[in-house]
Image (spheres, helix red, strand yellow):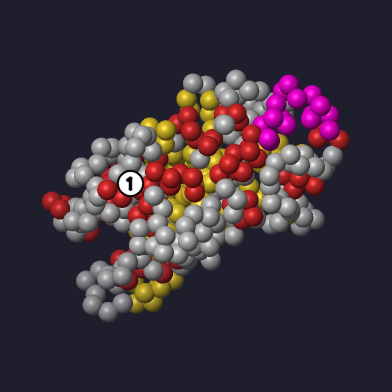
Amino acid sequence: MLSANNINRKSWIKYDSNSDFPIQNIPFGVFKTNKNNFHIASRIGDTIISLKNLEKYGFFEDLCLTKDTFQGKNLNKLLKQNKSIWRSVRNKICDLFDLENVQAKELISKENILFEHKKIEMVLPVKIGDYTDFYSSKDHATNVGKMFRDPENALLPNWLHIPVGYHGRSSSIVISGSPVKRPKGQILPKEAKIPIFSECKLLDFELEMGFITGQANKLGDTINIDNAEEYIFGLCLFNDWSARDIQKWEYVPLGPFLGKSFNSSMSPWIITLDALEHFKVAGEKQNPEVLDYLKFKGNKNYDINLEVLIKSKTSKPTLVTKSNFKYMYWNMSQQLAHHSINGCNINAGDLMASGTISGPNESEFGSMLELSWAGKKTIKLENGEERKFLQNGDTVIMKGYAVKNNLRIGFGELTNTII
Ligand code: CA
């Protein structure tokens, strides 16, 4: 039962009607206080709810939770439990903060459970095991193929048959707010045959979404596509920072390496797949027909508006692109089914990213590489400054939200500044 999704529900915590975090959202994250105390948390409006203390004071005693699920520094203990547990926690939190629940309001208000958004600092919510990055937006893959290979055959022959992906680096995934240091590496200058060692000159963002998994399959087993959503805990905004010049020189034949592994950043709140249930839509019809293990039933895409803004040292934030998660050609269920079809095990706390999400129109491209068409065009900021790629001091802000029937479920912001 998804009682937490009841759109008529109101909370005794007050929040704006355009908040990303109404009582129907109930995201999961981790914060620390100025005394370095870590709390696993949720959020309604701008009020942060310590799940650590709710558990400590016995509010979850009627749930079948593993002991001390919320006493650690990350969500992994919760992720190891199954979807019915995740669902029972979210439903329970909604019940406790429901406008009608006067008794809970009285009890909770007496204890040290609610925190002001401004007084805490969000930290990485998950101890990420493995990080996989897919390449599942057809428009993005087509744009890159047109720019770097053959405009007539932009997609490689495997692309329409396989959710293409690669194994990324989890150690350098950081939270919103962390600075991103411009990387250095090998670059092949134009017309040159020998590379130079240089600071990256073509630093880029990639607008992506990531999903966090629960405990899925044992080594040697596969995930059936019909059950794949059982193993998806929730989603975040994801910026897969890219050094295009380093990437271009290194990526043949084995794919991205140091051009990607210097940093990826994620938004602090994980929005559960359950909270996004209202926003399911059909994806593009897949043609050619996919192999049986990739065939799925029902709508598996999600209508989530995505925006990227750039703020320089002197400019205000300028909207540079608007895209949508619904543009994904390969959906998350297909990605998980494909990832495990060889018997590879998916663990609690793995992160899978979508790949850059571009839409069909120029105003919907998900990277500077595409927006500037490999440096041939310029992007204007609000104060007249121009960009082809990112400069030091630039702040990249990503936003995501879904809206339907007056219900808004948002992701907050993913904000990082280049140093
Ligand atoms: Ca990527």
**Residue at 49% across / 21% down in the picture?**
405
Residue beneath label 1, please?
330
Residue farthest left in this picture: 152
- The residue type indicated by label 1 comes to Trp
* Whole-percent x, y for residue 297 in the image: 34, 37
Give 112 or 350, whichever is nearer the viewer: 350
Give 259 or 78, whichever is nearer the viewer: 78
Q: Start and end of the magenta stretch?
A: 92-107
* Whole-percent x, y for residue 139 in the image: 28, 45
Residue farthest bottom in this picture: 194
Quick check: is 292 in the magenta stretch? no
Q: Is the residue 247 above or below the residue 48 in the image?
A: below
Circle 1 sits in a helix, a strand or a loop, which is it?
loop
Quick check: is 106 in the magenta stretch? yes
Quadrant showing the N terminus: top right
**Residue at 47% across / 61% down in the picture?**
218
Q: For residue 19, what is the image quadrant? A: top right
